[in-house]
Image (tube, helix red, strand yellow):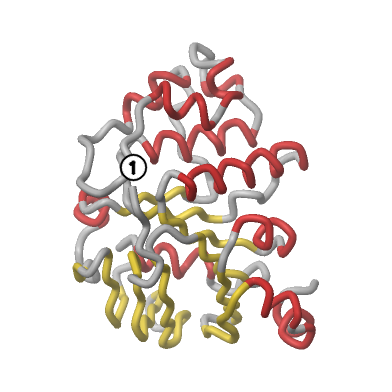
Amino acid sequence: MTAHANSPALQLKEVSAAYGQAQILFDVSLDVPTGSVVALMGRYGACKSTTLKSIMGLLSSVKGAVTLRGEKIDGMASFEIARRGLGYVPEDRRIFTNLTVFENLDVGLQPPRPNTPHWTPEKLFEIFPNLAEMRNRPASAMSGGEQQMLTIARTLMGNPSVILLDEPSEGIAPVIVEQMARTIKALKAEGLTVLVSEQNLYFATEVSDRAYVIEKGRIRFSGTMTELAENEEIRKAYLTL
């Protein structure tokens, strides 16, 4: 499929969010062009995950506009947003541990969508060769990195046009991190649009076209990965530990 790089598949305009009386996102605006990988970067606690949850309709107190392929989705329930083609892979790997790899994939099955990559188990096994080797293994017998890959693969079985990845490199072995980077590049090559929340600058540089840096719920930088790599002031202020 052809990716139209100049049209945003996902767009946020002045999105604010609160937990109870405490405001935690402040007028967050960002664009994710169709067919691109965009990184939302920041330290732990910068509100990266909160931003993804706000997009996915998982917070009750959200203001501002969120559009998916030109359709307003703010205010919709999470299941309605998912049905419109937004996939979400949370950080905590919500898989069914009592099911096999193949059975987990089957749970995520949704019909194909127009102008969107169509995924089947066999096609996913090409992208995730580790999963192919353990298709009949219970998910409980997999490593954390393998479970993370299974979570992504199961989400892709829903044939999303855009996918949100929350900290995909967090807490997994370096060799799996490299595999994860190759996987995200392969998904982009298939025409999938990706917004990835990440604090690993090396990983984000490997997979992403553009980056936004968030700190305490506010966007502090937006630009290409090259511009971020060259901006030592921003990196020191908001990304280094």
Closer to the camera in the image, 92 or 238: 238
In-image side of 156 versus 226 (left or right): left
Whether residue 22 is visible: no
Q: Position of residue 166 (x, y in %)?
A: 52, 55
Q: Residue 206 location in percent, x, y?
A: 68, 56
Question: Farthest residue toward the top?
Answer: 136
Instruction: Give the residue displayed 31% in from the left and 76% down from the top.
Output: 62
Q: State whether residue 78 appears in this view.
A: yes
Q: Is residue 27 above or below residue 7?
A: below
Q: Is residue 239 above or below residue 13?
A: above
Query: Would you identify the image quadrant in which residue 15 lies?
Result: bottom left
Residue 86 placement, left or right of 19: left
Residue at image position (56%, 33%) is: 147
Q: Secondary structure at mark 1?
A: loop
| Residue 211 point in image, percent of width and height | 58, 72
Q: Is residue 50 above or below residue 63?
A: above
Number of callouts = 1
Q: Quadrant of residue 178?
A: top right
Q: Nearer the viewer, residue 58 or 227?
A: 227
Locate residue 200: give its quadrant: bottom right
Q: Which residue is mark 1?
A: 117
Relative to 142, 34 lies left or right: left
